Amino acid sequence: MFGNLGFGELMVILVIVLVLFGAKRVPEISASFGKGIREFKRNLNDIEQSVTTAVTTPPEQMRQMQPPLPPTETVHAERDADREREPKRLL
């Protein structure tokens, strides 16, 4: 990532960051940046595991892992209740 930047360029960037944010805020900024990168990597690994599990798991076992669907009466009752709550339209 930093392969093309030399020591001089990194020092200039460090000085600019120090001038913009101050010496007290640089550790806070770098810590929050590190936390963000760790969270991103963790989420990426979770997604990769989910995809790998979905690809390698047989369909029968996937059906057992899925939560059961609600009864159709409940779905129809909820849909009818939503229609009742919807305001009347003029057009």
Image (cartoon, rainbow, N blue to C red):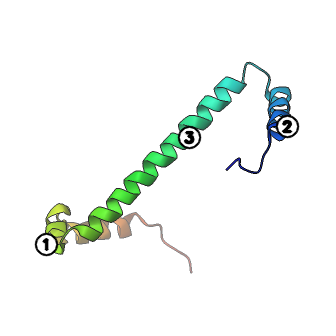
Identified at 79% across, 28% down, the residue is 21
Q: Amino acid at mark 2?
A: Gly
Quadrant housing residue 57: bottom left
Tell me residue 50's x, y (percent): 33, 60
Q: Which mark is residue 60?
A: 1
CA gap, disc 3 and disc 2: 27 Å
The tag earlier along the polypeptide, 2 or 1, is: 2
Asked if marks 2 and 1 touch (Cβ < 8 Å), the reply is no
Q: Is residue 21 above or below residue 74?
A: above
Asked if marks 3 and 1 touch (Cβ < 8 Å), the reply is no
Asked if marks 3 and 2 touch (Cβ < 8 Å), the reply is no
- Closer to us: 80 or 62: 62
Q: Residues within 10 Å of mark 1 (few under 14, many from 20)?
A: few
- Closer to us: 8 or 83: 8
Residue located farthest toward the bottom when viewing the structure as drawn: 91
Q: Residues within 10 Å of mark 2 (few under 14, many from 20)?
A: few
Residue carrying label 2: 8
Q: Amino acid at mark 1?
A: Glu
Q: Is residue 86 above or below residue 30?
A: below
